[in-house]
Structures are given as structure tokens and as C-alpha cells.
Image: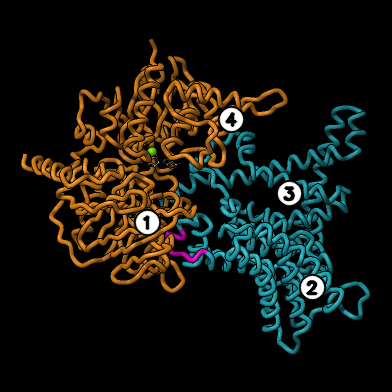
Amino acid sequence: MAPVLELRGITKSFPGVLANDHIDLTVEKGKIHALLGENGAGKTTLMNILYGLYSPDEGEIFVHGKKMEIHSPIDAIKAGIGMVHQHFMLVPVFTVTENVMLGEEYVKAGGILDRQKAADKIREISDTYNLDINPDAYIKDIPVGMQQRVEIIKLLFREANILIMDEPTAVLTPQEVEELFKIMHTMIEQGKSIIFITHKLGEVIEIADKITVIRGGKVVGSTTPEESSLSELASMMVGREVNLVVEKTESKPGEVILEVENLKVLDPLGAIAVDNMSFSVHAGEVLGIAGVQGNGQTELVRSLTGLLQPIDGEARLCGKDITRLSPRDITELGSAHIPEDRQKDGLVLGFPITDNLVLNTYYLEPNSKSIWLDQKQILENSINLVENFDIRTPSPLTPASSLSGGNQQKVIVAREFSRPIKFLVASQPTRGLDVGSIEYIHKRLMQKRDEGCAVLLVSTELDEIMQLSDRIAVVYRGKVLDILDAKTATKEWVGLLMAGIIPSEEEKEKLVSKKKQILMI
Amino acid sequence: MEKPQEIKKKSFAIFWDEFSKSSFLVILLAVFTGIVLGGVLVAITTNEVYDAFRVSFLSGLGTALRTAWNTYVALFTGSVGDPEKISLAFSSGDPLAIRRAINPFFESLVQSTPYIFGGLAVALGFRAGLFNIGVEGQIFIGAVTGVWAGYAITGLPAIIHIPLAMLFGAIGGGLWGFIPGILKAKTGAHEVITTIMMNYIAFRLVDWLLKFPMHDPNEFTPKTPWILETAKLPRFFDTPIRFHLGFFIAILMAVIVYLLLFKTTWGFELRMVGSNPNAARYAGVKITKTTVLAMVLSSALAGMSGANEVLGVNYRLLPAFSSGYGFDSIALALLGKTHPLGVILSSLLFGFLRNGARSMQLAVGVPIDIVSILQALILAFIAAPAIIRTIYRLKESKHKEELVSLSSWKG
Ligand SMILES: Nc1ncnc2c1ncn2[C@@H]1O[C@H](COP(=O)(O)OP(=O)(O)OP(=O)(O)O)[C@@H](O)[C@H]1O
Ligand SMILES: [Mg+2]
């Protein structure tokens, strides 16, 4: 039997980059095919070609052994191919039904939308695959994980047989990932095939049937989870040995850099998001903020960087109250900020990399003299940073919008790390990055810490928090439940706190002694 | 790593790659297609063509082609000049005849001048994410303040009087734009709505001013007094050529706007606010201040457009003097990709079309509206590049088609 999908010799170049170089890929029916590769390896490009968003320079696509010309998503959908993009394409003020119907409307006589019929079908799909979706809910009211399931329903609604999922797990909590995997299993049981892109190697090992690794636009190998291991996959992707464990020296905490006292912050809707938080960060230490997404982390970070004004409490940076200061004032006190949403806050996508690298220092010497920008200096600065931080781009003058997701992140990290700083707020600093880049950014973070910088690390990746932090503050519903010493804290302990459960003294003892045992071995 | 020069070279290659496949070519083809369709339109609105078709198909086709051709010849001679007449005039050596023969070209430049100011005004606003629909009203206010400075301030030498009068025009327009600017910054009122309202207020205010406080007592109809000799923008030739210094002031303003937008820290802030206000806030830019200032500068440019007309062409202010320069400016700023150089080029296109249209009407009796339709067709094609790409089977630009980001539309 012919494979469900076969790509032959797909080639695509962008100005200055060969994004896909004669890629062959075969997907079998009822299998999950994982696509692995560094940032900028060309995974998204390949999937966009398959989905008809880009046209390839060369190459052929076969579906069920039949050659297909796919020039637009409409062609792709007709061929039974559907895609869940990394950035969702939903209309927030529409209901689930309306979003699902968009582009494939059911109509009654007289051209009136038949919402009832569509909603019934959605309910049916939702039951078959255990998606737990209410067709009448508004997109803006439902959590990210559920929004993603709406995207999946959109594909199933259109009877797609080949589902492309581009980094679907990047925005999900661990529980949501588990749910997604269950759904994926149901889908393959129903005879669908899935192409799954992720940077989390553990996920690949857990769920994939087959793995194809792409590097620099070429297929460099293919394997199965049984035949490979985490470190093998990592080195296959990056082309060198990757150290998956961060080397951490003993921290030497110095004076208090940031002191937060009874901070209270409202979210944009006026509900209390940060509820009386107090903690401090010392020079030369990493304080990790652990917590499930949406427990006040976003508002905490925004209030510490001048983007949101707290309603009560104090935050002192180097002894100075910053709750009433503007973002620029805070930056000038020597703080840096890696924002959670890089495309929304961290970059001007239409600007070239050069300009994005001086986004908050353009007005200072030597980037400008009086009112004039020094473009030569800005270009030289970018050449250095592109090299030092390994930003993969054909030229520093390329607009940030045409970088791959991971390289966009590196632009931000390069910018924030390249000036002298005393305090760093890093919010999801490695979201969407490949293992090589994560290793690199983690190293840089530890280096900043060792130079005496105080680091506030906010991450929903428990592993990242456990690896990098010296102390861990677990937040739940806007409150700091506990601050643990990273040396004694265990994943279970933090996990319990993240769920809002404060372990009793006995339990703590048990958790700590367990960790000690592990350390002894 | 590469040296700066190499990087420049490489990015030039990328630029060229882009250019040959994309926007600029699309614009040229859009203009071309607009002209072809305009010709068809001329043919099907001419009675002779139908008469000829009744005789035979071929004669019908011939007449249609001839009509379209004649129309465009008239458009060309009306906007650039008649080559035959020019060479005759030069060989005769009569200075007046020469001036008459070359006048169409210079008159087109005169027509383009207010467009350049107006287009720059809209472009600067766009870059800051502001949609300044109020250019027309700001032109009127700039004309009022400019003309007032021209006739009411006396005893100055031209070298001071001219810049002062232009400055008055800029200040007048700027103040008019300050109101929607501050309303947007302080209350969030959308500038599209407020600037439209400000237009109506401007029109009626100018009507009133012309009837009462600024009315020339020697005139029966509403007009202001003539401006003083010292306030007139100097002309470079004798009659009938009206070509005046305003054109070069407009070019100078384009250079200044270019430098401001792309070479100064303030322009950097302005473009940041325009293309991603969230990132601008993150980077420490004061959005309110930048927005208000951009609005004021944009409308100051519009005000100069009005002052330029009264100081360079009309020498006094009459009712309804602008006749839509401000609204055309919005279209031509988009046509010029909101870049000062693009604005100059599209202003020239509009100026030449507008000037040629008049003689087209005189020579072949084609209604002046055909030119408006022509402009509309060209703009429609540019706004919908997909049509042009499909007609000419162009490859998609490799970079994503640059959307004119009107973040302010989102409210
Ligand atoms: N629209 C575009 N214009 C120009 N270059 C592009 C464009 N899209 C992608 N590229 C380039 O093509 C290469 C492959 O990008 P792609 O987005 O496919 O990478 P990826 O494997 O999905 O990476 P990531 O894991 O970071 O998302 C990159 O070098 C990128 O800079
Ligand atoms: Mg990608």
C-alpha cells in the first residue's frame, strides 16, 4: 500500500537562505511522525509548503500515491491535509462553532448560517476524540490548551487525514500535554496520520512512531524512539555533543538587588493577579518562579518592568522604589527583561535585526550622537552579536519577521545580555528553542549569575526551574506559597505546591530525604 | 564574520532580488494596466466608436484605438508639452513662444507641489500608525494662516517674510492637528473620526473667515486681500509659467522627513510606535508624546501645502481652493509606500495626470473625470497586487508582501 504522504526532493530558498534542500519524507498511515531539527532548520517552511502557504522551488508531493499540486491551503484541505499553526488562527470574539465554521459554513435555506448543525457535528467530534469542547463558548474565554483543541476540531471538521502540528506543546502545561497526547493516540487509532514538530526530545521519545531529523534544510537521518536516546537525538540535531545538564557552580549570593514587599497587581480585567507577594533576589543568585501558567507570573513581571502599575506594595531595585517608574527608568537602573511574548513585546518584526538589537539603547552613545543614529555603529554592533549569539540569518539587515522562532528569541537574548546589567528578568527564556540553543542560553544565564547579576527566572518548564534556580518560589493563584532551597527541593515537592497543595512537615521530610538518597547514589 | 561592506553588498543583492520580483514592478504594471483600461473606457464612452462599429468591426476597432490614442496624446501634450510645438518655438527664438511651449511641463510641477507636502503629511502619520484623514482641513487652515501672514504682516524683506509666512502655514496646520492628536493620546478618541470632524470645522471656519474678518472690502465675493509682494514665493520664469520656489521647498521637506524618519532617534521611536506599540512601550518610548508630536508634524506639513498654494500660485485665498488635494494625498502616500521618495514620485504622477486632464478635456472633449477613474484604477490595482500578479503571472515576492500596517485601525 502506498504511504499516506510522500514528499520528494522538496527545495525552497529564501533570499540568502536555502531553507529546504531536497527533502524526502514519507508518512505512513496511522503513525505519528516526529520532525526534529534546530531552530531555522526548515521544519516550519517544509510544513508551510505542504499546506500550500509557500510554493516549493522544486519537488513533488504525493498523497496516497497520487501526485498533488498544492498551491493554497484550500488545495491542501481538499487533499485531506490540515495544519495547527504554532500561533493559533482563531477569532477571539467568535464562538467555537463560528470559528470552526469559518471558511466551511453550513447554511440553511436562504443563506442563513446553520449553527445548530455545525454545533452538533462539533459535539460529535468532541465526543469521539474526548476533546471536551463546548461549541458555544467564546474563544476569548477559554484557556490556551482548549483553544488548541479547537484548532484540532477545525481540522477534523474538514475531515483531514493528515494533521500537521507545529510545536503544539510549546504553550501547554504538562497536564495539557498529557491530554494532547491522549487525543493524538485516539486520532491515529481512527486511522489519521500526524506530523508532529517539537523541540522537546522527551516528548518525541514518548509519542513518536518515527523520527526524521533535519539540519540546515537537509534530512540528516531518521530513526525510531526504540533505536535512539535523548542524547543521541540531541547530537543528531545539532551535529555535536550537547550537554543536557547545566553545569552549575555553587552560588555566592551578595547584597539584595530586588526586594518585593506585599506587591498587589491587577490584571487587565481588574481581577487581583498578584496577591501580596513578597520575596527578594540577591546579587549572584537565580530565583526561579515556578507555577502553572496564569497564576500571576505575567502580571508580576510586567509590574517589575514598568509595563503595569501595581495597586499596592513596593518593589525596590537597588534600594529604589520602581513601582511608579517607567520602563525606560527601570532599564536605566541596570535591569534587563526577556519578555514572555517575544513577537508582541520583544521585537518589532518589520525592523531589521540591526535595529531590533538596539531597541532600547538606540538613543545612547555610541548608537547615536545627539539626535543622529550612528548606523555604522549599529550595524557593527549587530555583526558582533549575530556572531557571538549564533543568530542564524543571511544578513543582519534581514527583517526579524523572516527569522525562525528560535532565532528571534536569540535576538532578544543577545540584546538584553549585551549591556551591563545588575538585574535580569527572564520570562520563558527558552520557549521554542532547540536543545543546542537552550544549552547555550542556560550557560549565558549562569554566566550572568556568576558575574554577580541577580536573576529572576520565570518559567512554566519545571525542569528548567529545577536546573537553573538557586531558590525556587512557587506561585499559586497570585500568592507565593513557599520559597524552597533548590538544593533540597524535589520535583514532586514543587509539583505539589504548583497544584496549590502545601505538604505537611512529615511529607517534606520524606521528600527531602528521598532527594538526599538520590544525591548519595 | 563578514565585513560591513560585504554585508551591504549581500543585502543589496537581496534588495535587488526583491525589487525585481515585487512591489515596484507591481506599481509600474498597475500604472500601465490602469492606462490600458482607461483607454478602453474612453473608447466605450465615445459615440463615434459606436457609429464606426455599425459600419464594420474593423473600422470600429480602428476608431476605438484612435480615440484612445488621441486622448493619451492630449494627456501627454497637456502635461509634458507638445514636442513639435517646442521645437518650433525654439527655432523661432521667440521667448514668449518658448515659454508657452514648455509651460505644460512646469505647470505639472506646480500641480505636483501641494501633493508632495500633502503626501508627506500622510506618510509621516502612517509611519507612526496614525491615519490622518484631516489633511484637507489642515491644508485650508494652513492656507488661512499663511495668507494672513502674507498680507497682514508688513514691512519685512522677502527673505524673512516668505519663510515666516510658510511657517505660519505650518503652525496653523500643526495646531489643527494637535487637537485630534491630544484627543487620541488623552481620551483614546480615534483620529480617523476626529480628523474628519476637524475637516468640516475647518471648511466652515474658512468660509466664515473669508466672509467676515478676512474679507477684502474691495471685493464683492468672499476673498482675502492680495498678499504683499514680499510674501510671494518667487517664480523662475515670466508669464505664463507659474513654476515657483514652493516645488523646491517641497523637495527639501521630503529630504528632511526622510532624514527625520530614518536617520534620527526620534524617527526610530516614531516608526517603532507605528509598527509595534507594545514593543515601543517595552523599549521605553513615551507613546503619548510620540503620537501627539507625529500628528502635529504631519498636519504642519499639510498646512505648508495650503500656504504653498496661496503664496506661490493664487496670492490670495478663495473659497474651495484646494479641491481635494488632501484626499488625493492619502491615496498617493500609499502609492508611494509611505516613503518620501515614493511620495515625490507618486505626487509627480498625480500632478501630471491632473494637469494633462484639463487639456485632454479641451482638446478631445473627454470628460476630466476619466482621469479620476484612471487614478482610481491604478490605486485599486496597487491595493490588490494579487490581481496584477495574476494578470502578468508574476512570482510571489519572497518576503511577505509588506502590509501597510495601520495599527490604529484596530482602535
Ligand atoms: N518568510 C521568510 N522569508 C525569508 N526567510 C525565511 C522566511 N521564513 C523562513 N525563513 C528562513 O528559512 C530558514 C528556515 O526557517 P523555519 O521557520 O522553517 O525554521 P524552523 O525549523 O521552523 O525553526 P524554529 O524551530 O526556530 O521554528 C530560516 O533560516 C529562516 O530565517
Ligand atoms: Mg518553526
Label 3 environment density (alpha carbons within 10 Å; few <14, some 14–19, many ≥20): many
Mark 2 and mark 3: Cα distance apart in space: 32 Å
Tell me the kind of residue under disc 3: Gln
Q: What label sits on residue B375 in the rendered view?
A: 3
Position of residue A486 in the picture relative to residue A33 (left or right): left
Q: Residue furthest top?
A: A1
Mark 3 and mark 1: Cα distance apart in space: 60 Å
Q: Chain of mark 1?
A: A
Front disc: 2 or 3? 3
Are the residues at dot 3 and dot 1 in contact (C-beta closer than 8 Å)?
Answer: no
Tell me the kind of residue under disc 2: Asp
Does the numbered disc 3 mark a residue whose Cβ is under 8 Å from ligand 1?
no
Q: What label sits on residue A114 in the rendered view?
A: none
Element type at marker 4?
loop
Residue B373: x and y in percent read: 77, 46
Mark 2 and mark 1: Cα distance apart in space: 78 Å
Tell me which residue sits at (68%, 58%) in the image.
B193
- The part of the chain drawn in magenta is B280-287
Q: Do the residues at discs 2 and 3 belong to one chain?
A: yes
Element type at marker 2?
loop
Q: Is residue A19 above or below residue A6?
A: below
The chain drawn in orange is A
Mark found first going from the N terminus, 1 or 4: 4
Element type at marker 1?
strand
Name which quarter of the figure residue B172 lies in.
Answer: bottom right
Position of residue B223 in the picture relative to residue A123 (left or right): right
Tell me the colour chain B is drawn in.
cyan
